[in-house]
Amino acid sequence: MTPLSESTRKSAEYFSKASEVIPGGVTANIKYFDPHPLIMEKGKGSKLYDVDGNEYIDYLLCYGALILGHGHKQVFEAVTKQMIEYGTTIFGTPHKLETTMAEKLIELYPSIEMVRYTNSGLEATLLAIRTAVAFTGKSKIAKFEGHYHGGYDQVLVSVNPDMELAGDQTEPRAIGESRGLPDYYLENTIVLPFNDLESTEKILRAHADELACTILEPIQSGFIPADQEFMDGLRKITAELGILLIFDEVKTGFRLSLGGAQEIYGITPDITALGKVLGGGFPVGAVGGKKEIMMITSARDGRDILTAGMDNSNKQEPLYHSGTYNGHPLIVAAGLATINELEKEGTMDELFAITYALREQLERAYKEHGIIMQTIGEGSIFNIVIAEGPIKNYRDLEKANLQLRKEIDYKLLELGIYTKPLNRYSMSIVHTEEDTERTVKAHKEAIRRVLNK
Ligand code: PMP
């Protein structure tokens, strides 16, 4: 294995070893990049340290989950307190903290009246979709091209499709994103064009009788926002057609505002899926929504609710939702500590201010070097897109100069700035001005090295 650079020799060695026992050397396909990913050993505050001892300013932040950075004192204390006072593990029974958290989510998220927990964002969107199918008695789902909702069959469709196969922009084809995906899912997942209300409406109307829900990332991939007009229209049409609207706020939750994208847009979805930040760095997911919808999972009352006024004779039992680790007390404690930190006066504003300042300085730096670049995003996440003109959906990203961006990203790794090449930037409340200054300087140097090669 040829190391990425002279200073990452140990990473290359560990990766070779990992590749003997783990397919592809990674525990999630997304973690790989050429020639080998960096093997990290330690995280502290805004920094990551690899096995060669290199320090990086971390902008991956575990794909956005670590809004307080690595090893935040309050999270550490909440988790250790929970362990010392109440035991190291989950009880497998209801406990007080899960209600405390549910009350907090209800307070923060306009759409949430009741909550169930899962162990990941993937499971949250899966439960959200099953809830919609059960509630409406319809079985197909609609999702948007380029939107990711977790790695399972129903939604591993047209996330990152090949343009040769993807069909017309106004009527995208359903493209499977994995081997082993039965045709069933491609037939039952309708793909919609993001930020194109007219085409979306046309497709939704044509399939209204069979569509249980429309799921979307309000901010695609965390950085391409839905237009307000598009959101308003989508809410109106789905309500009219009896299609439940699911906001996948796994990424946007707590990152755009404490009440997620729905608070910013002033739109109330029927169901919301949460994850990432909610777990304070530990695996978590949650599904919330209107009481009448969420009660479908109620073991006690489900039967009555399900039979009331519904004509699908299959729907005699409550929706099945289970999970040994759902509502794990240590994780809920970490999540509550995280939210508590974010709720402190001025914290979110400061986070947004440092994010926007970095974006502005980066844009200036690229411009100085004659590179047409725009940063796109909302709140505490953004991406660097080397392209002109508006970026409104997956297909617009085709315009971007990914090759140049990638070359710069690789140089940035050598210069101690970490995000996976081509990945977006997530910020934390512990990133400092010193970090952002170093980051801008590193970008300038990376650009210089790439342009002068
Ligand atoms: N939905 C969105 C919008 C996500 O960004 C992700 C994770 N990247 C998921 C769902 C899946 O979450 P998890 O990785 O926790 O399963």
Image (tube, rainbow, N blue to C red):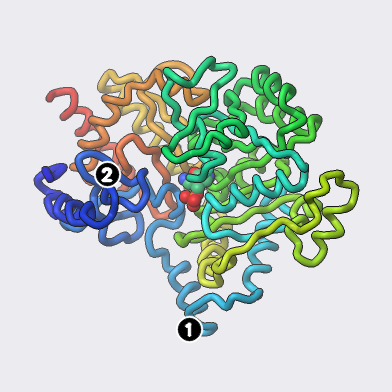
Q: Which of 333 and 275 is in front in this view?
A: 275
Q: Compare residues 370 and 192 and report the one nearer the observer.
A: 192
Question: Which x, y percent locates residue 202?
Answer: 70, 19
> Most extreme residue toward the right, as rendered?
309
User: Is residue 183 shown above or below 46?
Assistant: above
Q: Say which quarter of the image contains residue 372.
A: top left
Spot occupied by residue 437 in the image (x, y as percentages of width and height): 30, 42
Considering the image in quadrants, where does the C terminus appear?
Answer: top left
Say which of 452 and 22 sits in front. Answer: 22
Amino acid tagged 1: Ile
Q: Give the number of the disc on residue 84.
A: 1
Question: Is residue 63 in view?
Answer: yes
Residue topped by disc 2: 417
Q: Which amino acid does label 2 sit on?
A: Ile
In which quarter of the view is residue 398 placed? top left
**Residue beneath the point at 77% across and 30% down:** 209
